[in-house]
Amino acid sequence: MGSLLAATTHAPAMSAILVFETTRSYDVVIASMPACVISAVIAHVIRHRSVYSEALGLEADPSFTPQPPG
């Protein structure tokens, strides 16, 4: 569960925290954190944009800075 979430969102730390919140077990978090990091790295290599970037239509441009409204 955590690895899939980390891969789709490109956020391994958030995925590990969510795993802890659902299981309340530090042992599971320690075991799942490397899997979350590895899956996020592999997903980033395959596709540079996360599911959130896809939904917003953002480009994978490191110089992209959002403009304030108005």
Image (cartoon, rainbow, N blue to C red):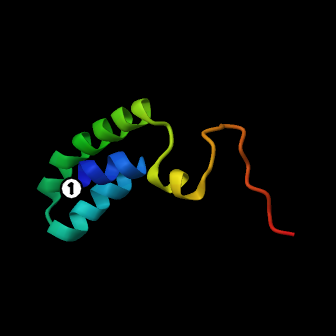
**Residue type indicated by callout 1:** Met
- Residue lying furthest right: 70
Nearer to me, 7 or 35: 7
In terms of secondary structure, where does tag 1 sit? loop
Q: How far across and down, in percent of the image, does residue 5 sit?
A: 31, 54
Q: How far across and down, in percent of the image, does residue 70 sit?
A: 87, 69
Nearer to me, 36 or 30: 36
For the point 42% across and 47% down, which residue is it?
10
Q: How far across and down, in percent of the image, does residue 39 sit?
A: 29, 39
Relative to 30, 9 lies left or right: right
Q: Is residue 12 visible?
A: no
Quadrant location, the N terminus: bottom left
For the point 79% across and 57% down, which residue is it?
67
Q: Is residue 36 visible?
A: yes
Crowdedness of circle 1 by 10 Å Cα count: few (<14), some, many (20+)? few
Count the labels in the image.
1
Nearer to me, 48 or 39: 48
For the point 27% across and 50% down, which residue is it?
4
Q: Is residue 5 above or below residue 44?
A: below
For the point 29% across and 36% down, which residue is it?
38
Q: Quadrant of residue 21?
A: bottom left
Relative to 36, 67 lies left or right: right
Quickly name the residue at label 1: 1
Relative to 23, 42 lies left or right: right
Q: How far across and down, in percent of the image, does residue 57 sit?
A: 60, 52
